[in-house]
């Protein structure tokens, strides 16, 4: 899944996961989990994440390499939020080659900056199970409480307005250029980030076959 922060990559990844029964590997969630557990990687990652910077490639690549070697991913997986830099795309190429795997699709989720800012500012996330809500378009049943697991919902530190702006710059500079890399392979599929939620399953099925 490739697209700016707040474009709806995570939501689409979850839908694809349900449609095709393949797990999602979400580097943002894995890093947030490492921060919450206070691991060595988590301690280094926290500062970068709070500022809206990319966590150093060395750390992210290690975390991903470890996750991708787990047995539940044998039948395929969805990468949400990785790769985000050229060095990460190189690492992914190496990992896939080692395992005899290939990328089937790169889903490019598109959305304009204004829509992104509105979306992220109204986003509320569950720190326990990763569920994501929107105060207007997808509010939780009880204010501030996760429908799925009952935990308290939060506005992520990196969803604050000035950090959002910086995350968009980082996306444009470091991540967006990866589209050129995958263009030649003919595997990019564009999905509008503002497609209504109830139409997404049909659209994604049409695109992915
Ligand atoms: P996300 O939830 O995908 O928006 O990620 C939240 C934050 O985690 C990002 O702003 C980065 O600081 C960090 N992060 C997630 N994935 C990566 C990645 N592939 N490379 C570097 N940093 C990442």
Image (cartoon, grey):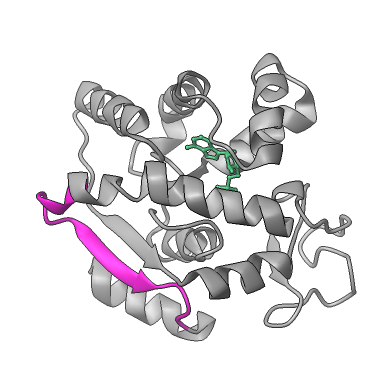
Q: Is residue 109 above or below residue 98?
A: below
For the point 77% across and 26% down, the residue is 37
| Picture coordinates of residue 65, whole percent (x, y) | 42, 23
Q: Is residue 28 above or below residue 92?
A: below
Whether 186 is among the magenta residues is: yes
Nearest the camera: 185 or 50?
A: 50
Nearest the camera: 22 or 116?
A: 116
In this view of the protein, can residue 201 be seen by the observer? yes
For the point 74% across and 56% down, the residue is 160
Quadrant in which the N terminus is drawn: bottom left
For the point 33% across and 61% down, the residue is 108
Q: Quadrant of residue 35?
A: top right
Whether 62 is among the magenta residues is: no
For the point 42% across and 29% down, the residue is 68
Which residue range is magenta in the image? 182-195
Left or right: residue 165 compared with residue 124: left
Quadrant in which the C terminus is drawn: bottom left
Ligand 1 shows up in the quarter that is: top right
Q: Is residue 26 above or below residue 99?
A: below
| Picture coordinates of residue 190, whole percent (x, y) | 29, 68
């Amino acid at each position: 899944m490739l697209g700016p922060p707040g474009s709806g990559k995570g939501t689409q990844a979850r839908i694809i996961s349900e449609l095709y029964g393949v797990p999602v590997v979400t580097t943002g969630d894995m890093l947030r989990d490492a921060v919450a557990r206070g691991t060595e990687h988590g301690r280094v990652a926290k500062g970068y994440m709070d500022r809206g910077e990319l966590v150093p490639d060395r750390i992210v690549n290690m975390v991903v390499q470890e996750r991708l070697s787990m047995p539940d991913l044998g039948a395929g997986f969805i990468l949400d939020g990785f790769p985000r830099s050229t060095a990460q795309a190189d690492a992914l190429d190496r990992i896939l080659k080692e395992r005899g795997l290939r990328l089937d699709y790169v889903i490019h989720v598109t959305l304009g900056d204004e829509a992104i800012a509105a979306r992220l500012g109204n986003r509320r996330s569950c720190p326990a199970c990763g569920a994501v809500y929107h105060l207007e378009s997808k509010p939780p049943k009880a204010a501030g409480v996760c429908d799925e697991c009952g935990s308290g919902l939060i506005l992520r530190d990196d969803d604050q307005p000035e950090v959002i702006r910086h995350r968009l710059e980082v996306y444009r500079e470091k991540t967006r250029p990866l589209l050129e890399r995958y263009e030649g392979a003919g595997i990019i599929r564009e999905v509008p980030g503002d497609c209504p939620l109830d139409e997404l399953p049909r659209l994604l099925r049409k695109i992915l076959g």
